Image (cartoon, helix red, strand yellow):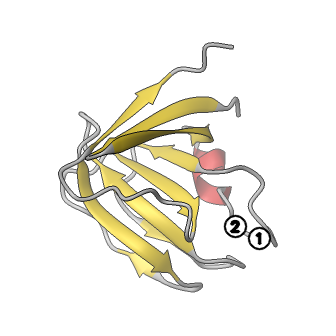
Amino acid sequence: MQKQNVRIRFPGGQLLLRIRPAESFAARFFGYMGRKAPHCPGILFTNCNSIHSFFMHFDLDLLFLDKKGRVLRKVLGLGRRKMVFPVEGAWQVLELPAGKLPPVEVGDTVLVEPDAN
């Protein structure tokens, strides 16, 4: 999985994160699962509208996005062994270790930009 830049725009600012896209079945299946600590700052799951935290060792912050990058749902501090059921209209999920999500709200836009390097 190559890293790519994700520019998160929100009222009052923006943040650039380097994340790993999870587009294949294996990448979506494993994500952070089984890791004692995050192996990357974030994961962007494509063609995804629900998330679980089974076999996880740390809490998560999540943004559920539609195809235009609009935030449909925000979940902070999802604990271990939990599940977020399908979010209607969601096409991507941005998953970050808990506490790393900037002040993004439902309705804000997250722009996914390819890595220039």
- The residue at which mark 1 appears reads as 34
Out of 97 and 36, give the one closest to the viewer. Answer: 97
6 lies above or below 66: above
Question: Quadrant location of the C terminus?
Answer: top right
Left or right position of 44 against 92: right
Image marks 1 and 2: residues in contact by CB distance under 8 Å:
yes
- Place of residue 51 in the rendered image (x, y in percent of width and height, measured from the top left): 45, 66
Residue at x-position 58% and y-position 46%: 25
Question: Quadrant location of the N terminus?
Answer: top right
Out of 48 and 93, give the one closest to the viewer. Answer: 93
Find numbered disc 2 in the image and state the secondary structure of the residue it sits on.
loop
| Residue 44, label in figure | none
- Place of residue 106 in the rendered image (x, y in percent of width and height, measured from the top left): 22, 58
20 lies above or below 104: above
Residue sticking out furthest to the front: 12
91 lies above or below 54: above
| Residue 33, label in figure | 2
In this rendering, the count of numbered labels is 2
- Crowding at label 2, few (<14), some or many (≥20) Cα neighbours within 10 Å? some
Residue sticking out furthest to the right: 36
- The amino acid type found where label 1 is placed reads Gly
- The amino acid type found where label 2 is placed reads Met
- Place of residue 29 in the rendered image (x, y in percent of width and height, measured from the top left): 61, 57
Left or right position of 6 against 87: right
- Crowding at label 1, few (<14), some or many (≥20) Cα neighbours within 10 Å? some
Residue at x-position 68% and y-position 78%: 55
Left or right position of 52 against 4: left
Residue at x-position 25% and y-position 63%: 87
- Place of residue 111 in the rendered image (x, y in percent of width and height, measured from the top left): 37, 32
Find numbered disc 1 in the image and state the secondary structure of the residue it sits on.
loop
Residue sticking out furthest to the top: 116
